Image (cartoon, rainbow, N blue to C red):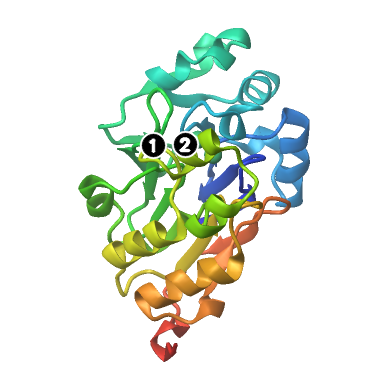
Amino acid sequence: MRFASIGSGSEGNGTLLACGDTLILLDCGFSAKETVRRLREKGVEPEQLTAILVTHEHADHIKGVSVLSSRYNIPVYLTWGTFCCKPLQQRPLIESLVTIITPHEMFMIGDIEVQPVPVPHDAREPTQFVFSTAQWRVGVLTDVGSITSHIISVYKDCDALLLECNHDLELLMSGPYPQSLKRRVAGDFGHLNNQQAALLLKAVYSERLRHLVITHVSQKNNALDRVKDALVRAVNCRSDWIQIADQDTGIGWQVLTRNERILEEASL
Ligand SMILES: [Zn+2]
Ligand SMILES: [Zn+2]
């Protein structure tokens, strides 16, 4: 199993998950044209995609979904709540390409088992996902305002975790956002701050975790040294073990293997 990101942040998101011939694009928050350009940077042609899976209807996750799907005949998986959102009503999906999922039931896309996880976020039916094969588990968790016990139980025992570290609370509060937006981002239905992400990481952390990728980092309200500091403190790992999926290029393909990880040499 392998994964990559074509970009992560409030300007657009897209994550690739692959196993054998199965290739999932999780979210498509760039225009279709820009998505194709970014896919090609990762060596992927849009025709190769098995499916587009959507977490929720915010523009940074859904912008290119309709056009990419209809242009290249790609099936789309999403909840009923996401399906009913305004942007997808204005630029509808082709009905025969749509599969409605429920956030409580596992399903398969090709060779990959997909476990949906309902999350607190200010969207109609927001869902995050853990992807599994017989051997591997990859958890993707972004756009979450608060951590639930269900989230902790589902994200345990992952081989790779792509985790939102959206903002530093101090930087958000002293930053340029208007008060109402600050309240939204920091609220229970907003985004994970560094300390919340660190708590989540500590709660789900196991010897099995080989890849930790920081995602959905705010360019205005966070700093990478603050993110890394919070995560390193939480699990006593090396800061150079932590990877980043950024807004411009995401992160290149990561192949899951059982290689020794360098984490055991951890020192603060
Ligand atoms: Zn987002
Ligand atoms: Zn969102």
Asked if the beta carbon under badge 1 is closer than 8 A to the nearest atom of ligand 2, the reply is no
Return the x and y of residue 261 as percentages of the image width and height.
Answer: 44, 81
Q: Quadrant of residue 171?
A: bottom right
Q: Nearer the viewer, residue 167 or 9?
A: 167
Q: Horizontally, is 38 left or right of 116 in the view?
A: right
- Relative to 193, does residue 12 appear above or below in the rendering? above
Q: Earlier in the sequence, mark 1 or mark 2?
A: 2
| Separation (CA) of disc 1 from disc 2 | 7 Å
State the residue at coordinates (61%, 48%): 8
State the residue at coordinates (46%, 39%): 183
For label 1, count other residues whose C-alpha is less than 10 Å away and answer few (under 14), some (14-19) or many (20+): some
Residue type (three-letter) at the residue carrying disc 2: Arg
Residue marked by disc 2? 184
Return the x and y of residue 14 as percentages of the image width and height.
Answer: 60, 42
Q: Nearer the viewer, residue 158 or 227?
A: 227
Please say whether residue 100 is visible from this viewpoint. yes
For label 2, count other residues whose C-alpha is less than 10 Å away and answer few (under 14), some (14-19) or many (20+): some
Asked if the beta carbon under badge 2 is closer than 8 A to the nearest atom of ligand 2, the reply is no
- Relative to 127, does residue 16 appear above or below in the rendering? below
State the residue at coordinates (43%, 80%): 237
Quadrant of image for the C terminus: bottom left
- Relative to 118, does residue 244 appear above or below in the rendering? below
Residues marked 1 and 2 touching at CB (< 8 Å): yes
- Relative to 193, does residue 91 appear above or below in the rendering? above
Return the x and y of residue 68 as percentages of the image width and height.
Answer: 67, 26
Q: Nearer the viewer, residue 188 or 140?
A: 188
Question: Which mark, residue 189?
Answer: 1
**Helix, strand or loop at mark 1:** loop
Residue type (three-letter) at the residue carrying disc 1: Phe
Report the mark closest to the observer, 1 or 2: 2
